[in-house]
């Protein structure tokens, strides 16, 4: 495992990215922002947590139309503005 400063990382980015790509752990230490672990993005990495990703059929069952959205939204907006 490599623990390096942000300055060291900026000076040798390619070196440390190569190490991470080859399976090494690299931790960046920042005086102001704490520590961060570098890791490669893979085909299994997602930006959305997996528990929020539904099967296509379940996603369609949960979907609503624009009209249904307005039916739900208008009463809430009217209540918000005391109408």
Image: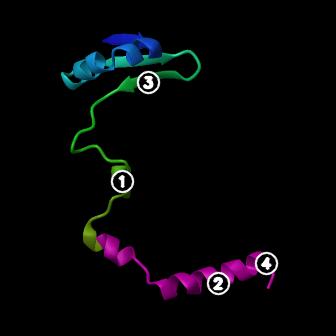
Name the quadrant containing residue 17.
top left
| Residue 69: percent from left, percent from top | 52, 81
| Residue 4: percent from left, percent from top | 40, 11
Q: Distance between the residues labelled 4 and 3?
A: 45 Å
Which portion, as a residue range, is magenta? 58-83
| Residue 54: percent from left, percent from top | 31, 63
Q: Name the residue under label 1.
A: 51
The correct choice, above or below, for 45 with respect to 73 in the image is above
Q: How far apart are marks 1 and 3 (CA)?
A: 24 Å
Rendered-image quadrant of the N terminus: top left
Q: Distance between the residues labelled 4 and 2?
A: 11 Å
The correct choice, above or below, for 70 with respect to 17 in the image is below
Residue at x-position 33% and y-position 20%: 13
Secondary structure of the residue carrying numbered label 3: strand
Q: How far apart are marks 2 and 1 (CA)?
A: 30 Å
Q: Which mark is residue 74?
A: 2
| Residue 66: percent from left, percent from top | 48, 84
Secondary structure of the residue carrying numbered label 2: helix
Lower position in the chain sequence, tag 2 or tag 3:
3
Q: Name the residue under label 3.
A: 36
């Amino acid at each position: 495992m490599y623990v390096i400063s942000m300055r060291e990382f900026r000076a040798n980015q390619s070196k440390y990215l190569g190490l991470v790509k080859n399976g090494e752990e690299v931790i960046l230490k920042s005086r102001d922002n704490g520590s961060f672990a570098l890791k490669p993005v893979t085909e299994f990495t997602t930006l959305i947590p997996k528990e929020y990703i539904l099967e296509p059929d379940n996603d369609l069952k949960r979907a609503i139309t624009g009209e249904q959205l307005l039916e739900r939204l208008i009463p809430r907006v009217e209540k918000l503005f005391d109408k």
